[in-house]
Image (cartoon, grey):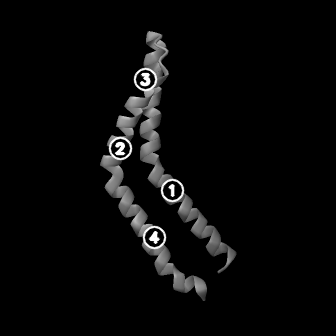
């Protein structure tokens, strides 16, 4: 296994992690910003107000994107297992 192979594997791993976390993080960011904007406009300073909408939004994002996320992770894992013989030689 060469250093180029290790760097390529690390890059692929980071890209898959970014792809898998993007829908959840983007949903949480948008909902958090919206609730924070609402709180600043209405001057409601309740810390737990942003928790429930984020929880619901992340749950919906997982329901919508979960199948794609699972298939992406399975494909990446299968590719890694397929690469094992070439990595050992």
Q: Which is nearer the eye, 37 or 46?
A: 46
Q: Which residue is mark 1?
A: 17
CA distance for labels 4 and 1: 12 Å
Classify 8 as above or below 24. below
Label 3: state its secondary structure. Answer: helix
Q: Residue at x 44, y 32 (%)?
A: 30
Q: Which residue is mark 2?
A: 61
In the picture, the quarter occupied by the C terminus is bottom right
Q: Residue sitting at 49 percent across and 22 percent down?
A: 47
Q: First in sequence: mark 4 or mark 1?
A: 1
Q: Are marks 3 and 2 in contact (CB under 8 Å)?
A: no
Q: Secondary structure at mark 2?
A: helix
The N terminus appears in which quarter of the rendering? bottom right
Residue 82's spot in the image, x, y percent?
A: 46, 80
Mark carried by residue 77? 4
50 above or below 59? above
Answer few, some or many: residues within 10 Å of disc 4's Cα (few below 14, many 20 plus, some between 14 and 19).
few
Distance CA(mark 3)–CA(mark 4): 39 Å
State the separation of the CA atoms marked 2 and 4: 23 Å
Question: Disc 2 or 4, which lies upstream in sequence?
Answer: 2
What residue did someone put label 3 on?
49
How far across and down, in percent of the image, does residue 86 sit?
55, 85
Q: Name the residue at the top extreme.
A: 43
SS assignment at label 1: helix
Place residue 5 in its image quadrant. bottom right
The tag earlier along the polypeptide, 1 or 2, is 1
Q: Earlier in the sequence, mark 3 or mark 4?
A: 3
């Amino acid at each position: 296994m060469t250093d180029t192979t290790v760097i390529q594997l690390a890059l692929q791993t980071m890209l898959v992690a970014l792809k898998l976390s993007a829908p959840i993080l983007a949903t949480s960011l948008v909902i958090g910003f919206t609730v924070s904007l609402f709180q600043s406009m209405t001057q409601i300073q309740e810390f737990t107000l942003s928790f429930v909408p984020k929880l619901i939004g992340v749950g919906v994002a997982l329901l919508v994107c979960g199948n794609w996320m699972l298939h992406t992770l399975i494909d990446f894992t299968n590719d890694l297992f397929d690469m094992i013989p070439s990595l050992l030689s």
